[in-house]
Image (cartoon, grey):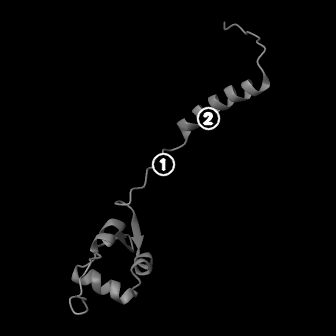
Amino acid sequence: MDAIILHSTPLKDFRDIIGNIVEEKLKQFRPETPQTNANSEYLTRREVCDLLRISLATLHTYSKDGTLKGYQIGGRVLYKTAEVNSSVQSIQSIKYKHR
């Protein structure tokens, strides 16, 4: 049989000890939250349109011609954030270049 030992511990220290024990036990039941990486985050069609400031029709055209690759999950079409960002290319205008 376990022995019961009475000890005079200040109330604040006792709360900290109990709080730490409860927190450790709760971590066992709480699912680990996956760290969202910008490369694995998906955007909806509307979010891509807002990000690129284009219409849904233009986004549809970009998807059809292969400029942007969409991923269908159920009835939804999603786009990877990294792919959307990498599809934006810088262009240099020679016409208005100052010398």
Say whether residue 99 is left or right of residue 43.
left
Image height of 44 relative to 31, above or below: below
How crowded pointer 2 is (Cα within 10 Å; few <14, some 14-19, many 20+) is rated as: few
Toward which corner of the image does residue 76 lie, by quadrant? bottom left
Q: Nearer the viewer, residue 61 or 50?
A: 50
Toward which corner of the image does residue 16 lie, by quadrant? top right
- Give me the residue at 41% from left, 81% from top: 49
**To which residue does mark 1 refer?**
33
Q: Nearer the viewer, residue 46 or 72?
A: 46
Q: Where's the N terminus, which quadrant?
A: top right
Image height of 18 relative to 91, above or below: above
What's the residue type where badge 1 is placed? Thr
What's the residue type where badge 2 is placed? Glu
Position of residue 79 measured from the top left corner of the image (x, y, whole percent): 35, 71
Toward which corner of the image does residue 61 lie, by quadrant? bottom left
- Give me the residue at 55% from left, 39% from top: 29
- What whole-number distance in Å separates the C-alpha atoms at marks 2 and 1? 16 Å
Say whether residue 14 is left or right of residue 61.
right
* Disc ID at residue 5: none
Q: Secondary structure at mark 2?
A: helix
Q: How many labels, in total?
A: 2
Callouts 2 and 1 close, C-beta under 8 Å = no
**To which residue does mark 2 refer?**
23
Q: Where's the C terminus, which quadrant?
A: bottom left
Position of residue 21 measured from the top left corner of the image (x, y, whole percent): 63, 28
Image height of 67 relative to 86, above or below: below
Position of residue 66 measured from the top left corner of the image (x, y, whole percent): 22, 79
Say whether residue 4 is left or right of residue 22.
right
Outermost residue on the bottom side: it is: 95
- Give me the residue at 23% from left, 83% from top: 92
- Give me the residue at 22% from left, 83% from top: 65
Outermost residue on the front side: it is: 99
